[in-house]
Image (cartoon, grey):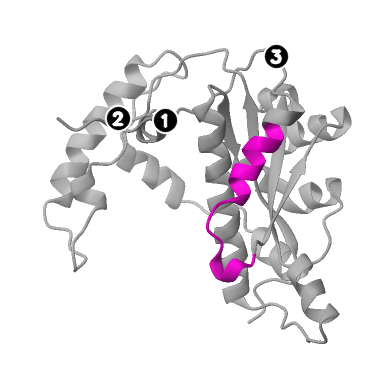
Amino acid sequence: MLNLSSTINVLSNHRSIRKFTEAPVGDDLLCKIIAAGQAAASSSFLQGVTIMRVTDPNKRAAFKEITGGQAYVETAPEFLVFCADLSRPMRCCATHGGTPYEGLTEHFIIATVDVALCAQNVAVAAESVGLGICYIGAIRNDAARSAELLDLPQQVYPVFGMCIGWPDQDPEVKPRLPLTVMLKEDSYGIDGEAEAIAIYDEEMRNYYATRSANIKIQGWSEQMAGLLGKESRLHMRPFLEGKGFLKR
């Protein structure tokens, strides 16, 4: 019988934690966790990531406001903002006599992917020692203000935040889409997908109806209608262009 590794168990049991104890994470442990994030794969070894540790209470309060009042952004023992950073490699390019090309969509993709890979390593490292995490995409509700709070230069943008701390809750694991829907072989097809999603929708309705907090009755596909059936954060394109991204 197959025995899953401890790493697979950690990954499979991820939950977003939104209530933390007051116990500190500790600088040494935090640095080890972030170092694990640095060890993630990096396209072309760009390492296009800067992590901002936010400790200033006034800035924490401002981020709480930006994120629509998410209290844990202000109260979690640690709040990190993961930034895609082309500024540093561009400075290095100039140092060696090169003229960096600005605004390339490919470079934007590379840096953004680097951020996602690094952050997920941080998340897994944190959860592996019993910490809890919660990604905070809502810092992009006002990306310009988030960038201003952190004094981010051109060619750097805030992708998402992350709360880290010792869990003070034990939420249920949220079911994911069936592998038969997500995993395809050789050719993209949708045979049987609607039926599988319908079964999954029922599983999600049961999960939402019986979980310990924020109870609701909704399937996954209904959520997608709400998510993709409206415009969202239209300010992001002009903000990114203003920061020097996505010009060509």
Q: Residue at (67%, 24%) from the top-left corner?
A: 72
Task: Mark yes or no: residue 97 visible.
Answer: yes
Q: Quadrant of residue 207?
A: top left
Q: Is residue 247 left or right of residue 53?
A: left
- Using the numbered discs, state the Cα–Cα distance from disc 1 to disc 3 in whole angstroms: 22 Å
Residue carrying label 1:
10
Quadrant location of the C terminus in the rendered image:
bottom right
Image: magenta residue range: 30-46
Q: Which mark is residue 160?
A: none
Q: Element at badge 3?
A: loop
Q: Residue at (63%, 36%) from the top-left corner?
A: 33
Q: Is residue 43 left or right of residue 240?
A: left
Quadrant location of the N terminus in the rendered image:
top left
Amino acid type, residue under disc 3 in the picture: Ala
Q: Element at badge 2?
A: helix
Q: Element at badge 1?
A: helix
Q: Is residue 184 left or right of residue 13?
A: left
Q: Determine crowd level at label 2: few under 14, some 14-19, many 20+ residues with C-alpha closer than 10 A.
A: many
Residue carrying label 3:
23
| Lower sequence index among marks 1 and 3 | 1
| Lower sequence index among marks 2 and 1 | 1
Residue carrying label 2:
204
Amino acid type, residue under disc 2 in the picture: Met
Q: Quadrant of residue 78?
A: top right
Amino acid type, residue under disc 1 in the picture: Val
Whether tag 2 and tag 1 are in contact, CB under 8 A, the answer is: no
